[in-house]
Amino acid sequence: MADRPVRKTKKDRDGDILALCDDGSVWSPRLKADAINDIESGVHTYYVPWTDGRTEVRVVEGENGKYLRTDRDNTSRNNLDDLPDC
């Protein structure tokens, strides 16, 4: 199992996350479906490194299926949207 940092994300026009990225990592980019499978199966974890700690990437079941999300500072804001594009 690997603990993978996420520093960038690939998004579509609507801002939906399509892939997780970390420049220079052999696993990057990791498509959303593959990252969801990794997390749910316990094969890999993904996290966003912050200056004051880290935030885990988790899988959420939404109206249109599963998606990736982080919750920072106990808010519902999806911080993956704030990361630079890859």
Image (spheres, helix red, strand yellow):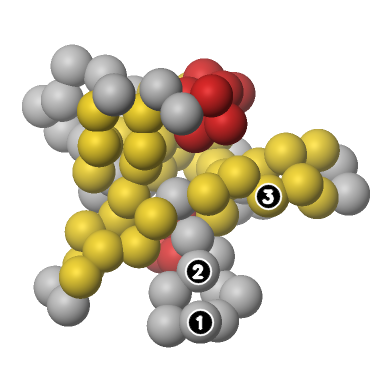
| Residue hosting label 2 | 71
Q: Quadrant of residue 48?
A: bottom left
Residue 72 x/y as whole percent: 43, 74
Horizontally, residue 65 falls left or right of residue 12, namely: right
| Residue hosting label 1 | 74
Horizontally, residue 15 falls left or right of residue 65, namely: left
Residue 81 visible, this orientation: no
Amino acid type, callout 2: Asp
Amino acid type, callout 3: Val
Crowd band around label 1 with a 10 angstrom C-alpha radius: few (<14), some (14–19), many (20+): few
Crowd band around label 2 with a 10 angstrom C-alpha radius: few (<14), some (14–19), many (20+): some
Q: Earlier in the sequence, mark 2 or mark 3?
A: 3
Q: Secondary structure at mark 2?
A: loop
- CB atoms of marks 2 and 3 within 8 Å: no
Label number found at residue 37: none
Q: Earlier in the sequence, mark 1 or mark 3?
A: 3
At 72% from the left and 39% from the top, the residue drawn is 66
Residue 85 x/y as whole percent: 35, 45
